[in-house]
Image (cartoon, grey):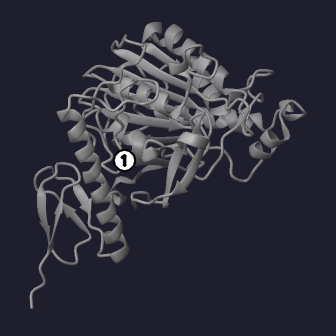
Amino acid sequence: MEMTGKRMRCSRCGAQLMVPPNTYTFQCPTCLTVIRVQPNNPLRQVHDSIRQTASRMKDLLYTVSSNTNTSVFSGNGYPYSWASGNSHYSQSVAPSLPFSAHGRKRAVLCGVSYYGQKYRLKGTVNDVKCMRYFLIQHLGFPSDSILVLTEEESDPCLIPTKHNIRMALHWLVQGCQSGDSLVFHYSGHGSQRLDFNMDEVDGYDEMLWPVDHQTAGKISDDDINATIVRPLPQGTKLHAIIDACHSGTILDLPFVCRMNREGYYHWKDHGIQSPIYKGTNGGLAVSISACDDHQVSVDTTALSGDTATGAMTYSFIQAVQNEPGLSYGRLLNVMSKTIHDAKKRQLLNGSIASLAKKLLFSKSSQEPQLSSSQKFDIYSTPFTLLRRPHHRQL
């Protein structure tokens, strides 16, 4: 008796497909996307059913809200619409932030210090100040096109709460078009949690910690991907510079660059694991993060003397300033060397807290990571935030 295939939709174009039995990968004839076919799993089927029900409920609530010509508002009065990583991205009501300028070059810089909390960080505000100066003075970003969120801001809408960070990310990509250059810089805590929608190679989602994470919760890589990666149109370029622990795949981009100690690299396809499309809408998204998903990053004075900074932020700015036109591969190598050299210096004698010493010398060393929405030659492609260079795709 001939076995029948099963129906499924393409995760990218939504086309209805008939997949032959005993098939594990299948190419969509419409958009040519290679889809991973999940084997029949009763637990997965129950999970998908619950997820689909929740998605339909959210769609219903959104429809009701739209039909009554009202928006869903948060406590501070801004229209709230957040694209969940468990559903397809859709255009939403534009967030009404007290920051109207856009421009072809814009940035969101977020530094979370966690004042009054057990795990306070001392270098995050310095990181944001350094990054803002670097973008304005060296790369020509307009000062009024840079949105800064720290706990030192007088405007409550610029405190790095979960809601405010979400709205800032919406602002970053709102109305972006070909030729735009976007930057998201985050300095703060990061962590992992078990992956419940089975789209992670290692079984864990990565998370960013807003200042109110204990009450409002953390921001997942699924949510970040759905909000600032998937909407990117053709010709738009996004760079995320993430100085946090466990941040290697914090944007959930399809391709992760794996490099050995000799500098040889290959691109690992993380997108094949996900039933949800994690790429862009034609644009380019690149993430440079402080460390791999299983590693921790350092907030320390070891690199800049008496001033606390994130090791990744400091080494990134120093590399780009000292060596204009360097490639992505060279950038990773220089950053890694800067961080490793700090271990050997006399600055470790009493000038760093004992926890930082432990982290710097731990077996799980901090290695800067690169991921992207597309593969390219990291040694022939010049690093730039200003415009989209020609990428020699692999």
Report the label total: 1
Instruction: Please give the name of the residue rendered at 32% of the width and 36% of the height, measured from the top-left corner.
Output: 392
Residue toward you, 366 or 49: 49
Residue 5 location (% of width, % of height): 14, 75
Instruction: Please give the name of the residue rendered at 44% of the width and 8% of the height, measured from the top-left corner.
Output: 144
Residue toward you, 127 or 288: 127
Q: Residues within 10 Å of mark 1 (few under 14, many from 20)?
A: some
Residue toward you, 134 or 49: 49
Can you tell which quarter of the image residue 7 is in?
bottom left
Res. 327 in view: no
Res. 343 in view: yes
In the rendered image, the vertical position of residue 364 relative to residue 93, given as above or below = below
Instruction: Please give the name of the residue rendered at 51% of the width and 34% of the height, measured from the top-left corner.
Output: 162
Can you tell which quarter of the image residue 368 is in?
top right
Q: Describe residue 224's horizontal placement relative to residue 282 as left or right.
A: right
- Residue found at the very far right of the displayed protein: 350
- The amino acid on which the numbered mark 1 sits, given as a three-letter code, is Gly
In the rendered image, the vertical position of residue 89 relative to residue 92, given as above or below = below
**Which residue in the structure is indicated by mark 1?**
85
Residue 170 location (% of width, % of height): 37, 28
In the rendered image, the vertical position of residue 291 relative to residue 324, given as above or below = below
Element type at mark 1:
loop
Looking at the rendering, in which quadrant would you find the C terminus? top left
- Residue found at the very far front of the displayed protein: 68
Q: Describe residue 78's horizontal placement relative to residue 217 as left or right.
A: left
Residue 32 location (% of width, % of height): 16, 52
Instruction: Please give the name of the residue rendered at 9% of the width and 91% of the height, measured from the top-left corner.
Output: 1
Q: Describe residue 10's horizontal placement relative to residue 353 as left or right.
A: left
Can you tell which quarter of the image residue 178 is in?
top left
Residue 350 location (% of width, % of height): 90, 33
